[in-house]
Image: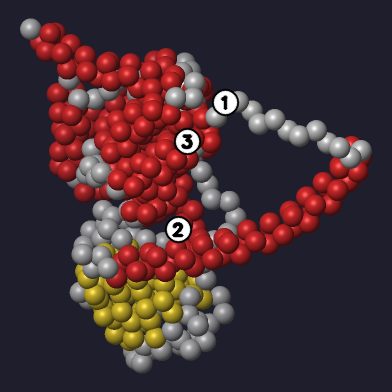
């Protein structure tokens, strides 16, 4: 059981929506009988509303309006469509429907998987080209460290669009290990994510980076336990500075 | 005198809410022009928030489309006593934008399985921001945010614009959980003071 002060420390997180499910439930049941916390919530809510509108204002492209409103037509129709009456016996129609539905279902699942796959690849490509064409793109070349002197890599980073990382000549990662890419800021190294490499020791990967990240002072690749870690622990394989 | 000034500022907000509610009613009864009106009134602020979170033009447009589709679908169910329409729209925009970023991050990192949704936060909450802020108030919060100590500001931004939980923020900033909670609270209290100084 948490003390009142411990619970009250969660008031701000509650308004921001950043409590996990358990904390949230605990805080809500506390709210029901705590006037002090209820008052704090009420006083903080306008602040959170202000966060929503205190971002840089951008106008969506004009074409979006038509897209949004085109979609409405179907949704707004109120009169239901009439269905034609079945001519064949009901059981026959039903059996046929089931056969078709199962076939179509199986097919749909397969197509959906392929689509999801393609979409992931497509988004990678799109995000990558967005970085390459970003007006604020910066290039950082990385050099192989003593453990992998032949390794080379290049990072292209845009604050608004993310990071594209390309590496070559990395030795294969040992079992249970993986390469992890870090954007090192003056405050701390921030993990960009894991880097998968092909058998030839090369790999290209897109990472989204927080737009408010401090300017990087270096980009690095370390060898870490598979799955990655929160802050670098392993040997440095590649390091580069802007 | 101050009361008159305050009322003069509140008046447009109240009118704007009334107009939004009337748009939703008309949308619910199948009036397409009302959908256009609602779009014209709010697309810019919704898109701005989405773009801040998603950071990509095409994806932000997709999210904006989803948000309006949801608003049009739920127009009939909108309950005016729950708060301002614009707050409702902004809340949907935020949670959908964050869902999008999370799903994308999960796919890029090769994680599978369900992406945690932040939908838990929104409309179950009572009194979802019945107050509408003036531009001046928004600007003062913006200024105050810029003046916060870096770690307080980052913690708040990670929570609000990236939808990270306290423990995820603690991990990202490499700070103890308790410190993160304190920083978020102190930061929000400072923003509140900035806001109230303008009220």
On the image, the x and y values in percent for residue B75 come to 47, 25
Residue at the image point whose x is 36% and y is 45% from the top = A64
Direction from residue A164 to residue A28 in the image, left or right = right
At mark 2, the secondary structure is helix
Q: Quadrant of the N terminus of chain B?
A: top left
Residue in the foreground of this view, choosing between A21 and B102: B102
Residue at the image point whose x is 43% and y is 66% from the top = A124
Q: Are marks 2 and 1 on the same chain?
A: no
Question: Do tag 3 and tag 1 residues touch (Cβ < 8 Å)?
Answer: no
Which residue was labeled with disc 2?
B105
Q: CA distance from mark 2 to mark 1?
A: 38 Å
On the image, the x and y values in percent for residue A195 come to 44, 73
Choose top left, top right, bottom left or bottom right for residue A140: bottom left
Residue in the foreground of this view, choosing between B143 and A95: A95
At mark 1, the secondary structure is loop
Q: Which one is in front in this view, the residue at disc 3 or the one at disc 2?
A: 3
Residue B197 vertical position relative to residue A19 in the rendered view, above or below: above
Task: Give the mark nearer the N terminus: 3 vs 1.
Answer: 3
Give the number of the disc on residue A72: 3
Q: Is residue B177 visible in this depiction of the protein?
A: no
Q: Quadrant of the C terminus of chain B?
A: top left
Residue at the image point whose x is 44% and y is 24% from the top = B31
Which residue was labeled with disc 1?
A78
């Amino acid at each position: 059981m948490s003390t009142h002060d411990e619970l009250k420390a969660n008031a701000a997180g509650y308004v921001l929506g950043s409590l996990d499910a358990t904390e949230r439930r605990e805080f809500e049941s506390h709210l029901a009988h705590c006037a002090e916390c209820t008052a704090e919530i009420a006083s903080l809510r306008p602040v959170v509303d202000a966060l929503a509108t205190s971002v840089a204002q951008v106008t969506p492209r004009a074409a979006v309006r038509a897209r949004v409103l085109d979609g409405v037509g179907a949704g707004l129709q109120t009169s239901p469509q009439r269905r034609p009456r079945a001519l064949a016996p009901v059981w026959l129609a039903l059996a046929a429907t089931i056969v078709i539905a199962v076939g179509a279902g199986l097919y749909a699942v397969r197509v959906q998987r392929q689509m999801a796959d393609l979409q992931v690849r497509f988004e990678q490509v799109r995000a990558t080209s967005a970085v390459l064409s970003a007006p604020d793109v910066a290039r950082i070349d990385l050099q192989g460290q003593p453990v992998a002197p032949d390794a080379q890599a290049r990072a292209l980073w845009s604050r608004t669009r993310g990071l594209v990382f390309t590496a070559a000549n990395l030795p294969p990662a040992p079992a249970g290990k993986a390469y992890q890419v870090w954007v090192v800021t003056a405050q701390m190294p921030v993990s960009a994510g894991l880097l998968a490499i092909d058998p030839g020791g090369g790999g290209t990967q897109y990472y989204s980076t927080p737009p408010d990240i401090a300017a990087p002072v270096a980009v690095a690749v370390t060898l870490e336990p598979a799955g990655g870690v929160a802050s670098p622990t392993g040997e440095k394989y590649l390091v580069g500075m802007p | 005198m101050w009361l008159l000034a305050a009322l003069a500022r509140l008046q447009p907000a109240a009118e704007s809410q009334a107009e939004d509610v009337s748009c939703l009613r008309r949308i619910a009864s199948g009036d397409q022009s009302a959908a256009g009106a609602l779009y014209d009134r709010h697309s810019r602020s919704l898109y701005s928030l989405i773009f801040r979170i998603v950071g990509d033009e095409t994806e932000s447009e997709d999210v904006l489309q989803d948000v309006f589709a949801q608003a049009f679908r739920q127009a009939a169910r909108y309950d005016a006593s729950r708060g301002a329409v614009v707050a409702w729209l902004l809340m949907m925009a935020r949670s959908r934008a964050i869902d999008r970023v999370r799903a994308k991050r999960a796919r890029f990192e090769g994680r599978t399985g369900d992406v945690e949704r932040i939908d838990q936060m929104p409309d179950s909450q009572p009194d979802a921001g019945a107050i509408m802020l003036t531009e001046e108030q928004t600007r003062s919060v913006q200024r105050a945010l810029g003046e916060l100590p870096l770690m307080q500001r980052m913690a708040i931004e990670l929570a609000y614009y990236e939808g990270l939980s306290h423990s995820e923020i603690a991990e990202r900033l490499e700070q103890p959980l308790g410190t993160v909670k304190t920083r978020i609270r102190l930061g929000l209290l400072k923003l509140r003071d900035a806001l109230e100084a303008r009220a």
